[in-house]
Amino acid sequence: MIHLNNTSYKKPELVAPGGDIEKLKTAIEYGADAVYVGGEGFNLRMGATNLTTEEIKEATSWVHERGKKIYVALNIFARNYHVSGIRSYLKRLAEIPIDAVIVSDPGVFLTVREIAPHVPIHLSTQANTTNTKSVEFWHQQGMKRAVLARELTLGEIKEITNNAPIQTEVFVHGAMCMSYSGRCLLSGFMANRHANLGDCSHSCRWHYVLKEEKRPDETYPIVEDESGTFILSSKDLCMIQHIPELVHAGVTAWKIEGRMKSPYYVASVTRVYREALDRYFADPVGYVYDQRWLSELEKVSHREYGTGFFFGNQGYNSLTTHPGNFYIKEYDYLGMINNVLSDGVAEVLAKNRITGNTPVEIIGRHLSEDFSQVLLDLRNEYNEPIEAAHAGQKVIVKVSRPVHKYFMLRKCG
């Protein structure tokens, strides 16, 4: 808790994605206060690995042992044929001491209240909560937290939060959707893959041209400006340069998007926001933004960064990116340290091809632990010299500084 200008601010909870067990543990190890996961179905990331009920049970124990929280997404807009499956799933989930479920559909909400009344409920951003009266309505139904719509400005978020009878949460980093709070029908129309059931085909990021009715064989590019022709594809959200403004909005929790991203993405993004948040609360008056934070965030795969709607619409198509489906990816994730065998020797689980005599960066839970070196004397798990390791292989490497489990290797692409 800090006090500024007669106002008290509680440190926000940092919520990170846990698409599978590995990413869940990585998020916690790199500074998340809570993780959100998807179960075997009924969430908006069908393409993610997701967790079985047994895995959620094991993950909940692991997270709680470390004093952290776990939230389970149950946020599809259900059809009638989903209802029996959701009821059955909730009966199993109710036996696990998860910290909350995340829902958007009022019918799913009622089902949770009926079958698992002891489980707290968070309202998904998909529910389009854009005003104080909506928050008040959900409070009356028994909602504990509302993840506010991504279309809101910081001023609107602050006003809602100041008058909210429940907790509030906002996304601060990650991929954005060009549609209103993600409730898009484009994917369903064009690919028969329904975004509101978790199977979005990202049609907004496809390449489009115009055709004239009487000249069907001729195509014309959709000219936007010198940046490109991709008028539907949004920039990725990045608020690392605006930590004080976010704190002053008073929200309970900050969420990082990315359940379908790699453990490296989860680690890199989480540790940066953790460091920035901790530094601000350690000395809000003397707080200074560190340029290294944005530099680190630019080392993960991402589209061009922007600030979404937090500061309003800052110009024509200010939320669109270029060029369409193109990701900025300058660094490759090589692997994660699986075990420290002895001083100067570590076992790495390769995630991509690792070759000997390669300059790499080794990143830790904190930026101060990062260092660079050349990988020499690469060996397999039987301690036999090798020239390269492939994804999934365990490899023994010599390290020039102390490392710990969950440290990661990357190289400039």
Image (cartoon, rainbow, N blue to C red):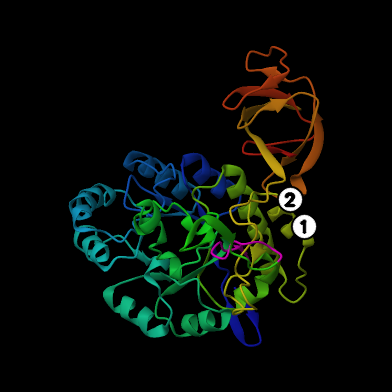
In the image, residue 25 sits, relative to residue 303, either above or below, namely above
Q: Secondary structure at mark 1?
A: helix
- Residue 292's mark? 1
Q: Residue furthest front?
A: 214
Quarter of the image that includes the C terminus = top right
Quarter of the image that includes the N terminus = bottom right
Residue receiving disc 2 = 367
In the image, residue 63 sits, relative to residue 360, either above or below, namely below
Q: Residues within 10 Å of mark 2 (few under 14, many from 20)?
A: some
Decide whether residue 137 is among the magenta residues. no
Magenta segment main secondary structure: loop
Amino acid at the residue labelled 1: Arg
Residue 130's x, y, as percent?
43, 79
Q: Residues within 10 Å of mark 1 (few under 14, many from 20)?
A: few
Cα distance in 3D space between marks 2 and 1 = 9 Å
Magenta-drawn segment: 226-238
Residue 343's x, y, as percent?
75, 27
Q: Residue furthest bottom?
A: 6
- Residue 38's mark? none
- Would residue 139 be visible to someone looking at this image? yes
